[in-house]
Image (spheres, rainbow, N blue to C red):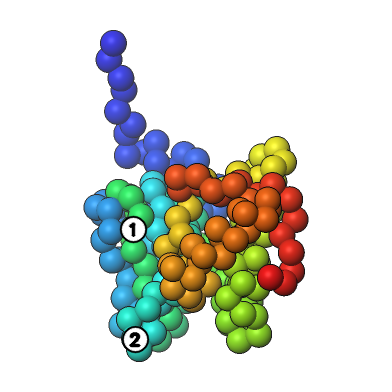
Amino acid sequence: MSTSIPSAEDLYTPLVPELRSLARRGVQRTYRKNAVLINEGEAGDSLFVLLKGSVKVFAMDESGREITYGTVYAGDYFGEMSLDGGPRSASVMTLEPCTCSVLSRTDVSEHLAEEPEFAINLVVQVIRRARAATETARNMALLDVYGRLVALLEERRGDAEAEGTASPAMLESITHQDIANRVGASREMVSRLLKDLEKGGYIELGIRRITLLKKLPSRW
């Protein structure tokens, strides 16, 4: 039985209309898994509309420890924080083979001139990501590792429930190293805390999976 190969145009179809018209202005490019698309601190004025795949947004501290800010999935865009010509505020790496529409600052400016309503979308995106970065910084400053772990797992629980996942919430495609990168701790410490929570009957650990059985205690 033959299978049809999606055309390039099919990648644009799932996008919301205002993002679809923007993406069509760009140059479509494909990237392999683990390709670094943006380097923190470098100059850049490109915006990426993610047509296929997923990427992580992260930074490195002086000791080389990674802090992951979040994941961007197909149907969203990234790179907008440097449209002012300033240095990149974070790095971006593909988590799987990806296809993007890459636009220059001129492309985006022309789009805004022709479709000014997209400016609201852009402003909301910047505010949303600035708020998320502020929350991450706040958690790093005010919470201990366990507190940051609980905050992350509860956030993921909320995402799972929003997608209609029945209770108990099952968090898929998540590793101890992924969590360590998000909460700014060692993988060993995260593994120890998760094991303790499993022994307490709060979670169930699987391969790249964590099932949240009941509300996590605020302190441990």
Name the residue rendered at 30%, 49% in the picture: 97
Residue closest to the eye, 176 or 137: 176
Query: In the displayed structure, does residue 104 sit left or right of residue 198?
Result: left
Q: Which of the image's four quarters has the N terminus?
A: top left
The vertical placement of 28 against 151, above or below, is above
Residue 20: mark in rendering: none
Closer to us: mark 2 or mark 1?
A: 2
Q: Are marks 2 and 1 in contact (CB under 8 Å)?
A: no
Cα gap from disc 2 to disc 1, whole angstroms: 23 Å
Name the residue rendered at 37%, 67% in the picture: 92
The quadrant where residue 4 appears: top left
Residue closest to the eye, 105 or 196: 196
- Per the image, label 1 sits on a secondary structure element best described as strand
Q: From where the camera sits, is residue 83 visible? A: no
Determine crowd level at label 1: few under 14, some 14-19, many 20+ residues with C-alpha closer than 10 A.
many
Residue closest to the eye, 149 or 188: 188
Name the residue rendered at 32%, 39% in the picture: 8
Q: Amino acid at mark 2?
A: Ser
| Residue occupied by mark 2 | 63
Indicate which disc, 2 or 1, sits on the residue closer to the N terminus.
2
The vertical placement of 75 against 117, above or below, is above
Name the residue rendered at 27%, 53% in the picture: 33
Query: In the displayed structure, does residue 39 sit left or right of residue 59?
Result: left
